[in-house]
Amino acid sequence: MAGRGPQTFKKRQKEQARKEKQQEKIAKRLERAKQGGVSLTDDDLIESPSETEARLEIERSLEKN
């Protein structure tokens, strides 16, 4: 087994780290699936101007009734 050096060890560590990260991602996906799979991002929380106008129109019509 002569000839194996630190490069092989580094490759092994790198591969183990990659597998651990992959397992963590799978676990997170499963957890999100159990919770319903709905996740809001910042983009989902920000209304566009047209959405704001539509919401205001609906609120105004509800106040009149």
Image (cartoon, rainbow, N blue to C red):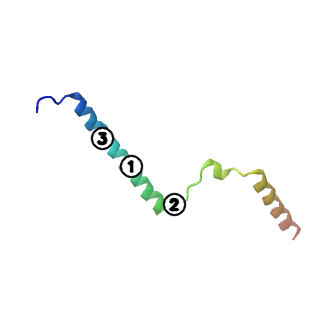
Side of 51 relative to 44 (left or right): right
Task: Identify the residue position indicated by label 1 in the image.
Answer: 24
Q: Residue, x 81% and y 64% (percent of image)?
A: 58
User: Spatial distance from mark 2 to mark 3, Cα to Cα?
Assistant: 29 Å
Residue placed furthest toward the bottom: 65
Mark sitting earlier along the chain (2/3) = 3
Residue 10 position, x and y percent, is: 27, 32
Q: Residues within 10 Å of mark 3 (few under 14, many from 20)?
A: few
Residue 65 position, x and y percent, is: 87, 71
Secondary structure, mark 2, is loop
Mark number for residue 37? 2
Q: Residue, x 27% and y 35% (percent of image)?
A: 11
Instruction: Judge whether 24 appears above or below 14 on screen.
Output: below
Q: Are marks 1 and 3 in contact (CB under 8 Å)?
A: no
Residue 6 position, x and y percent, is: 22, 28
Instruction: Judge whether 40 appears above or below 11 on screen.
Output: below
User: Spatial distance from mark 1 to mark 2, Cα to Cα?
Assistant: 17 Å
Q: Residues within 10 Å of mark 1 (few under 14, many from 20)?
A: few
Q: Quadrant of residue 51?
A: bottom right
Q: Are marks 1 and 2 in contact (CB under 8 Å)?
A: no
Task: Identify the residue position indicated by label 3 in the image.
Answer: 15
